[in-house]
């Protein structure tokens, strides 16, 4: 394993180079911490809005006994909650892309460490390669990194965007049920409307999430791909 010589410079090596790489590594760690903090804050804000909306609707339902007033208050309120949820998911996906960028950056720095001291390779658990398998290894997503599709399917609902997708789809299902109730359809049709709205919202958000991670900017194209690639 070797590192490239910078244009017009000398081959990196020695304590000075290690200090520069370590400083950049600590900078990436601090940036990742800020990313996680913002993600958790966004989720907390959305859950607080959802909880407040449900408590308000419970009070209205107690006063109106789920009548017309409740329906016409609940639908716009839940639409607002769904919009907030979609905005939160969008931001979380952007933060995940940012986190992926920092992981790739740290893998490249790790590649530099091993270029200077290849004898340290047995002591590293995280990857020193900047392609997708290397990033997944660093993140500890072993099932996905190994190419096991079933592990990937079960991993998605465990992520923050995946969890919020299910919640927002449930809100869409509630809106569908209330819309069906507003036009006085039979009870089975109300259940079918709720299920249909839930499934449609889940599928659309799944497609949206998949598209958001399919393409990477040129700066994230692998420079040090894994050996088996």
Image (spheres, rainbow, N blue to C red):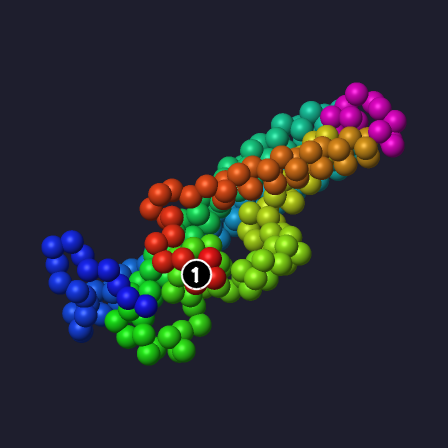
**Residue 198 appears in the rendering:** yes
Q: Residue at x 74, y 26 (%)?
A: 179
Q: Nearer the viewer, residue 24 or 36?
A: 24
Does residue 84 appear left or right of residue 225 in this picture? right
Q: Relative to residue 163, is residue 215 depicted above or below?
A: above
The residue lying at 55 percent from left, 51 percent from top is 160
Residue at the top extreme of this rendering: 183
Residue holding disc 1:
226
Q: Nearer the viewer, residue 163 or 12?
A: 12
On the image, the x and y values in percent for residue 183 come to 79, 21
Q: Nearer the viewer, residue 164 or 56?
A: 164
Q: Quadrant of residue 207?
A: top right
Q: Is residue 229 above or below residue 185?
A: below
Give the magenta range. 177-189
Rendered position, 119 above or below 176: below
The residue drawn where x is 60% and y is 52% is 156
| Magenta-colored stretch includes residue 185 | yes
Q: From this view, report whether residue 45 is shown above or below residue 150.
A: above
Tell me which residue sits at (71%, 37%) in the image. 198
């Amino acid at each position: 394993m070797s590192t490239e010589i910078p244009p017009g410079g000398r081959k990196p090596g020695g304590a000075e180079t290690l200090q520069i790489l370590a400083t950049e590594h600590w900078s990436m760690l601090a940036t990742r911490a800020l990313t996680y903090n913002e993600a958790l804050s966004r989720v907390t804000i959305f859950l607080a809005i959802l909880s407040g909306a449900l408590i308000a609707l419970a009070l209205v339902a107690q006063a109106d006994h789920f009548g017309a007033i409740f329906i016409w208050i609940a639908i716009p309120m839940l639409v607002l909650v769904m919009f907030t949820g979609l905005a939160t998911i969008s931001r979380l996906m952007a933060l995940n892309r940012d986190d992926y960028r920092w992981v790739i950056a740290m893998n490249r720095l790790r590649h530099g460490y091993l270029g200077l001291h290849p004898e340290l390779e047995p002591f590293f658990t995280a990857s020193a390669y900047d392609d997708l398998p290397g990033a997944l290894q660093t993140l500890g997503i072993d099932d996905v990194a190994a190419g096991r599709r079933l592990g990937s399917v079960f991993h998605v609902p465990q992520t923050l965007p995946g969890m919020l997708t299910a919640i927002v789809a449930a809100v869409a299902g509630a809106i569908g049920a209330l819309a069906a109730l507003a036009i006085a359809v039979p009870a089975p049709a109300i259940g079918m409307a709720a299920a249909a709205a839930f499934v449609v919202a889940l599928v659309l958000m799944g497609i949206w999430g998949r598209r958001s991670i399919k393409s990477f900017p040129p700066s994230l194209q692998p420079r040090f791909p894994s050996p088996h690639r």
